[in-house]
Amino acid sequence: MILNRPSDFPEGRFSFYFVLMNTNEEKYSLCALNRIFGFEPKIGHSLISHLGCATEAFRLSEKEVSLLLGPYSKYKGKLNRRALENAAEELESLSRQDIRFTGYTEKDYPELLADCEDAPLGLYVRSRTPADRLFAPRRKIAVVGTRDISPYGQEWCRRIVHGLGTSSERPAVISGLALGTDISAHRQAVESGLPTIAVMATGPESVYPHRHRDFAEQLASTEGCGLVTDYPPGTAPLAIHFLRRNRIIAGLSEATVLIESRVKGGGMMTARLAFSYNRDVYALPGRVDDPRSQGCNHLIKEKVAEPVDSVEGLLDSLGMTAGRSTARNSDLELIMEAFGPATDTETLTDLKRMLETIRKNRGMNLDDLSASTGSGYSRTMTLTGMLEMKGLISIDLLQRCTINIRKSR
């Protein structure tokens, strides 16, 4: 595939798009591209980056499409005017059902999700709240887990979401509208007066499971709440669709809390995706012989997730304790707090650079860290030893460095 190059994107996500971005034609084009490249959005991103806007994709000749995507691309023949016309008809019809579409290049597309390389090319939104307010820079926390939730899991899900509701930030709760943990999180959010967004694995006009239809309608009509999906109308609730929608739950959220999960499950996938997006992950520990807790315990052991030992501890890690500033400490502040003004300026600067590099490259070993920072191996060993001694990082037997989440906030 010729155009699958995410590095084509400039630093400013909106800086390279034409004025057409705000026209209906651009929206229709984004909707059409979302239908065409839904399972491989990176190709769509690269195509838009190369052409300057989505609209230009539907002005290409067959020869130009072959040159850009390759002569044997399975998408050859799909970038045509009929696809654009179908998208226009679809969006006009959905607008009469109070369902809107926001495309990747539009200003009301959620910024956190846009940071993910596999972000969908567009989202269908059912909400009385306009997309720019629904996805506004309010903090968002994902609460996910198994469908087969235990009484222990239900109680802690209730406590955690209630705790978020009593915090100074009062974040939006993101989940997937599924049985068990998801619906418990959504319902508790509503009871706590928190906004909540359900990410669906079906088209925007349908709800699965059917028993949650009335509650979904309640969300769609409640200010600050809504239903979101990247799947077009008519999409059935297939297993693969649930797995793929998990990237949106993780991508929309700055942190993910895993309540309960088996070693293999949708909640585990969401947590690992969140970790891959460099977001904070928390997991509720449980009995070692309970299959519903084994996934959480496994993530904690791997240092992918920080254990939830109390609601107060979780809020503190999230920077949401009532009356406390929610801004995360900068790496320089963390270094100064840990080592104090007695440490010389050069060492403080090197420690800060080392911590920043580890934060951006979780699991990087000492050899690669030395090369990346430009420090010699001996100097890298000294600096990482200092950081480890202060509890800011951990170094495993394979010399891989990991940020200690709570210490490094």
Image (spheres, helix red, strand yellow):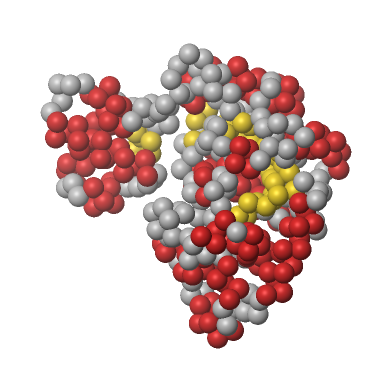
Q: Residue at x 52, y 68 (%)?
A: 47
197 left or right of 399 in image: right
Q: Residue at x 50, y 55 (%)?
A: 117
Residue 31 x/y as whole percent = 66, 61
Q: Is residue 59 above or below residue 247?
A: below
Depth check: 8 or 126 in front? 126
106 left or right of 177 in image: left
Residue at the top extreme of this rendering: 323
Q: Residue at x 39, y 54 (%)?
A: 11
Q: Is residue 165 above or below residue 88?
A: above
Q: Mark yes or no: residue 256 visible.
A: no
Residue 46 x/y as whole percent = 49, 66
Q: Mark yes or no: residue 245 visible.
A: yes
Residue 151 x/y as whole percent = 75, 24
7 left or right of 106 in image: left
Find residue 144 and report its image quarter: top right
Depth check: 362 or 57 in front? 57
Q: Is residue 373 above or below residue 72?
A: above
Q: Residue at x 74, y 31 (%)?
A: 222
